[in-house]
Image (tube, rainbow, N blue to C red):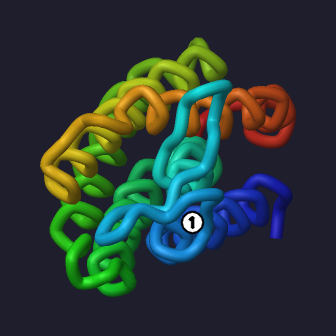
Amino acid sequence: MENRTRLGWIAFTGFLACIPLANWMIGHVGTVCVPNGPCLVPVAPGLMAPSGVLTVGAALVLRDVVQRCLGLRAGLLAIALGTLASALVAPAALVLASGVAFALSELADCAVYTPLQRRRLLLAVVASSMVGLVVDSVVFLTLAFGSLDFLAGQIVGKLWAVAIAVPLVRLLRRVAPTPA
């Protein structure tokens, strides 16, 4: 198996693993757990976010890697399977919010990433992740909690994951110089 394909399947597996992890974390991991609400983690001084943000930001970048290495169909399959996994593993109270937010954010990510990836990979990953993380945050918080109180924290938390991934995107250009 060539490096590009191997990396694509590793990203595909990692992408799918992010979903149940995010749903589990939101109810179990945090410095503070709000009664009948999410567990929160600090993402910046004075700024808290539901703990699932730590893996959702990574999922946005991993989906881009799947598409780069395995092609658009694999990227769309990952979104479909991820949406199903999100609905299956989310706590009952969060199934709708998790599934809808996941599907819409990943489709938005894909819509921005696809036309940009051929000429400007780093821009494609950053821009598509920015759009996807805002869509995910607004939709999830609105449907799950009826409030955008944690919006700034959600965005900052997901941006950390995207920022950490930027050096990996530079490496990706060497492993998969052109889209599959």
The residue lying at 27 percent from left, 77 percent from top is 87
Figure quadrant of residue 28: bottom right
Instruction: Quarter of the image for the C terminus: give it.
Output: top right
Residue 157, image x and y in percent?
57, 37
Mark 1 lies on a secondary structure that is: helix
- One can see residue 62 in this view: no
98 on left or right of 32: left
The residue lying at 23 percent from left, 84 percent from top is 92
Identify residue for label 1: 18
Pick whichever, 55 or 84, lies toward us.
55
- One can see residue 13 in this view: yes
Figure quadrant of residue 55: bottom right
Pick whichever, 42 or 70, lies toward us.
42
Pick whichever, 118 or 135, lies toward us.
135
The residue lying at 29 percent from left, 64 percent from top is 98
165 on left or right of 48: right
Q: Amino acid at mark 1?
A: Cys
